[in-house]
Image (cartoon, rainbow, N blue to C red):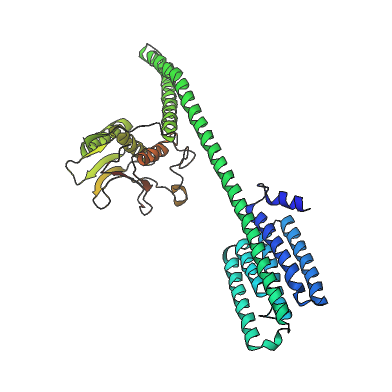
């Protein structure tokens, strides 16, 4: 039975809380077996047997019914009832019971959680103070005992409490080390899985891009030929689908390289105001939508070091994303400088449908879309986040903006080059 108990408390398939409940309850059952017979009366021995049976039954039922917290609460109530009885029946101050009150505090702290833990910790404190006060002002309530018995019980209790507490701490430390080792192993496996996934995506992306480019090229030849309107319409559909698939493959390849930290930023000094003007003009021309694309800044010129290609990529992704969810409105790029944080701050604001509060925390996740009908791959914002983090900036959604959506990202003015 003891062997089975050891196997259970070292089984990682069982929750940590349940295993701790088993260990601490076992320690407290041993404590009861030592404390209740201290007054050497038949009634206390009977009480000890009943209490141990009750605790064993509570443990069995609570584990079977998967209500460990309720079981721990019931045992905490039992301990709070037993220790005062034992305290006065064994001789009050002049016994070995006071030392055992420590285990009651330990039990409550380890097995209970949340508000219930705080309440019972307060009850333990109040009960201890009440027992000591009663024994001090009304010493006749405590059972009389000899000095020799008191010294023996006190020394014995001190040794046993120290021994049981040490055993408990050793068990908990061992469980912590095992859980920590398991966590590190799982972390290593996850990292290896991510590396394998990134390698797979990179390899497949390269393999798939070649035939897609061939399809686009051959389809372009068909479109330039003398073909009927029906064939031309089908060819244009093929062209659109192929370019969308190629965009998805490029995004997956870019994302896998960023996640694998295989992207190196190329720093060069540029005029950010001129760069933003060029990007806005380019997006405005390429999107061909009914939206108006604007750029606002108080600077006529501002030079800083950045990766121009990646900066363009982030702004284009954010503005293109805003354009998808805006019909006949405005998409505005703003640029400013925060002198206090030494950050260049960019924001892309639209007058579209906005993003619900419950979706805002998810938009930067891979393949996450605002709704099932949204166009695109769902990777653009994930790529933006990784690029911005790569240059030690931050990106977020302005939660207070209600006229649509506003994405903000920052770029350090003082670059820490890798």
In this view of the protein, can residue 83 be seen by the observer?
no
Q: Where residue 96 sits in the image (x, y, percent)?
A: 68, 74
In the foreground, 384 or 52: 52
Task: From the viewer's perspective, tell me whether residue 216 is left or right of residue 24.
Answer: left
For this rendering, which residue is in front, 9 or 123? 9
Q: Is residue 217 above or below residue 138?
A: above
Q: Residue at x 37, y 47 (%)?
A: 396
Position of 146 with respect to 418 (left or right) is: right
Asked if residue 306 shows in the view, the reply is yes
Which residue: 70% across, 70% down?
Answer: 156
Q: Residue at x 47, y 50 (%)?
A: 358
Name the spot of residue 107 as percent of width and height, x first: 64, 65
Which residue ends up furthest to the left in the rendered image?
300
Q: Is residue 245 left or right of residue 284?
A: right
Residue 264 appears at what percent x and percent y?
A: 35, 32
Looking at this view, name the residue that lies furthest to the front: 148
């Amino acid at each position: 039975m003891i062997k089975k108990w050891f196997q259970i408390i070292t089984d990682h398939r069982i929750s940590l809380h349940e295993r701790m409940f088993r260990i601490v309850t076992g320690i407290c059952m041993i404590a009861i077996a030592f404390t209740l017979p201290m007054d050497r009366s038949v009634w206390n021995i009977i009480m000890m047997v009943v209490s141990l049976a009750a605790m064993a039954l509570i443990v069995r039922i609570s584990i079977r019914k998967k209500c460990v917290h309720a079981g721990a609460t019931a045992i905490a109530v039992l301990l709070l009832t037993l220790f005062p009885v034992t305290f006065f029946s064994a001789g009050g101050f002049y016994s070995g019971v006071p030392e055992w009150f420590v285990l009651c505090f330990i039990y409550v702290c380890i097995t209970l959680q949340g508000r219930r833990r705080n309440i019972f910790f307060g009850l333990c404190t109040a009960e201890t103070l009440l027992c000591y006060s009663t024994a001090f002002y009304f010493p006749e309530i405590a059972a009389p005992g000899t000095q020799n018995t008191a010294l023996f019980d006190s020394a014995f209790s001190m040794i046993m409490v120290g021994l049981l507490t040490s055993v408990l701490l050793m068990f908990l430390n061992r469980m912590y080390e095992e859980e920590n080792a398991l966590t590190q192993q799982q972390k290593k496996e996850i990292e290896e899985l991510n590396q394998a996934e990134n390698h797979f995506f990179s390899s497949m992306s390269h393999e798939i891009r070649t035939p897609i480019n061939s399809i686009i090229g051959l389809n372009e030849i068909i479109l330039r030929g003398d073909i009927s309107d029906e064939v031309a319409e089908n060819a244009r559909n093929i062209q659109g689908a192929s370019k969308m698939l190629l965009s998805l493959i490029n995004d997956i390849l870019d994302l896998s390289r960023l996640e694998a930290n295989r992207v190196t930023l190329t720093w060069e000094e540029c005029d950010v105001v001129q760069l933003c003007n060029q990007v806005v003009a380019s997006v405005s021309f390429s999107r061909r939508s009914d939206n108006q694309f604007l750029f606002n800044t108080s600077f006529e010129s501002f030079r800083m070091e950045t990766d121009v290609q990646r900066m363009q990529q982030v702004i284009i992704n954010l503005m293109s994303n805003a354009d998808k969810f805006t019909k006949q409105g405005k998409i505005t790029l703003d640029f400013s400088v925060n002198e206090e944080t030494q950050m260049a701050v960019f924001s892309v604001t639209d007058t579209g449908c906005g993003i619900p509060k419950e979706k805002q925390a998810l938009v930067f996740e891979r393949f996450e879309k605002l709704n099932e009908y949204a166009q695109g791959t769902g990777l653009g914002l994930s790529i933006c986040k990784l690029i911005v983090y790569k240059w030690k900036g931050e990106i977020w959604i302005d939660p207070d903006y209600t006229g649509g959506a506003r994405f903000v990202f920052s770029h350090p003015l003082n670059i820490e080059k890798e």
